[in-house]
Image (cartoon, helix red, strand yellow):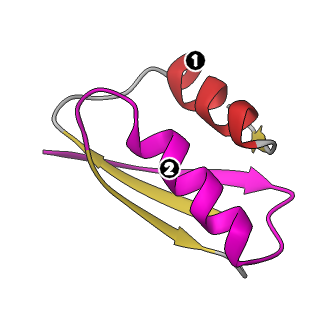
Amino acid sequence: MVTATYQVQGMTCGHCVSAVSAEIGAIPGVRDVEVELTAGRVTVASDEPLSDDAVRAAVDEAGYELAGA
């Protein structure tokens, strides 16, 4: 199991958390997604390391922006 943490910009509410969790959770191999709304931090547990492109695409699909990756 691999854990990675990402910064996501633009999340402001519970709907944001749900949208980001659902999109990242749909990436193959993802086991768990934890979102810290106030910190803008998303921690992802997966079977293997995820590509930044896959995470960025999921965050974009949810309507937010991956910071610094």
Compared with 52, 21 (above or below) is below
Residue 23, x across and y down, in percent: 53, 41
Between residues 6 and 65, which one lies in front from this camera angle?
Answer: 65
Residue 29 placement, left or right of 52: left
Residue type at mark 1? Asp
Q: Residues within 10 Å of mark 1 (few under 14, many from 20)?
A: few
Quadrant of res 39 = bottom right
Residue 11, x across and y down, in percent: 79, 64
Specify the label residue 22 is tagged with.
2
Residue drawn where x is 64% and y is 24% of the image: 57
Residue drawn where x is 60% and y is 32% of the image: 58
Tell whether position 18 is magenta.
yes
The residue beneath circle 1 is: 53
Compared with 15, 5 (above or below) is above
Residue 33, x across and y down, in percent: 39, 58
Specify the label residue 66 is tagged with.
none
**Part of the protein shown in magenta:** 1-30
Residue drawn where x is 51% and y is 55% of the image: 21
Q: Earlier in the sequence, mark 1 or mark 2?
A: 2
Residue type at mark 2? Ala
Quadrant of res 50 = top left
Tell whether position 27 is magenta.
yes
Residue 40 placement, left or right of 51: right
The alpha-carbon separation of the residues under discs 1 and 2 comes to 17 Å
Instruction: Report if residue 40 is visible in the image.
Output: no
Q: Secondary structure at mark 1?
A: helix
Could you tell me how many numbered marks the image carries? 2
